[in-house]
Amino acid sequence: MDRETLAAAIDHTVLGPETTPEDVHRVLDEAAEYGMNACIPPCYVADVADYRPDVTLATVIGFPHGQHATAAKREEAVRAWEDGADELDMVVNVGRLKADEHASVRRDIEEVVAAVPIPVKVIIETALLTDDEKHTACRLAKEADADYVKTSTGFADGGATVADVELMSEYLPVKASGGVGDYETAKAMLDAGAERIGASSGVTIVTDFVENYE
């Protein structure tokens, strides 16, 4: 592991409800400086699409609870892509998943995936699911041709765990997010099979690596 490889695996993130335009510009500046990707709220994508063209720009769909109507998620995805997003992180409909409405959950993902020609990551919100439900969510995401599965939105109690990453990586590439605040935790997720790390502390993770492990 070198600094560049680590940084390229990180989606430096700002998604809180209080996020300002200044916060978004800061995150993009930091992502560009350290070689990370960025994940920002959809309302700001059009504003900054050309600000840091060297940074892979992700945004979120159906965020944070996944309860938007499928048509709304699809429209939101198209708008985000047209605004300049390079990748989308969509939230699964957890309630329908728990109700065993598998066809509905699959269709929800399929319609977003089919609507845009860019990678789609499906956030399954592991903290709210049983292990059986995690398996089901990942299987449905794979059947729907999603590109990644992602552990968490950061809005539920609990975040990424090694056990969840190992489970999810049986199906699709994994983005581990939620509670990843230092290099040791990030490394544990990558060693467990994660290919991406979602974190608001991307700079801290890279700096921790450079100062203590490089």
Image (tube, helix red, strand yellow):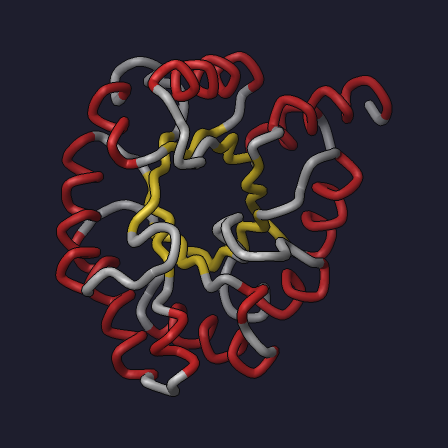
111 horizontally vs 106: left or right: left
Numbered label tally: 0
Q: Is 138 drawn above or below residue 59 in the view shown?
A: below
Q: Residue furthest bottom?
A: 100
17 horizontally vs 208: left or right: left
Quadrant containing the C terminus is top right
Q: Is 188 drawn above or below residue 107 in the view shown?
A: above
The percent position of residue 97, horizontal first and vertical second, equals: 39, 78
141 horizontally vs 125: left or right: left
Q: Residue at x 73, y 51 (%)?
A: 191
Q: Residue furthest front?
A: 18
The percent position of residue 38, horizontal first and vertical second, equals: 44, 30
Q: Residue at x 55, y 31 (%)?
A: 8
Q: Residue at x 69, y 29 (%)?
A: 205
Quadrant containing the N terminus is top right
The percent position of residue 114, horizontal first and vertical second, equals: 19, 59
Residue 209, picture quadrant = top right
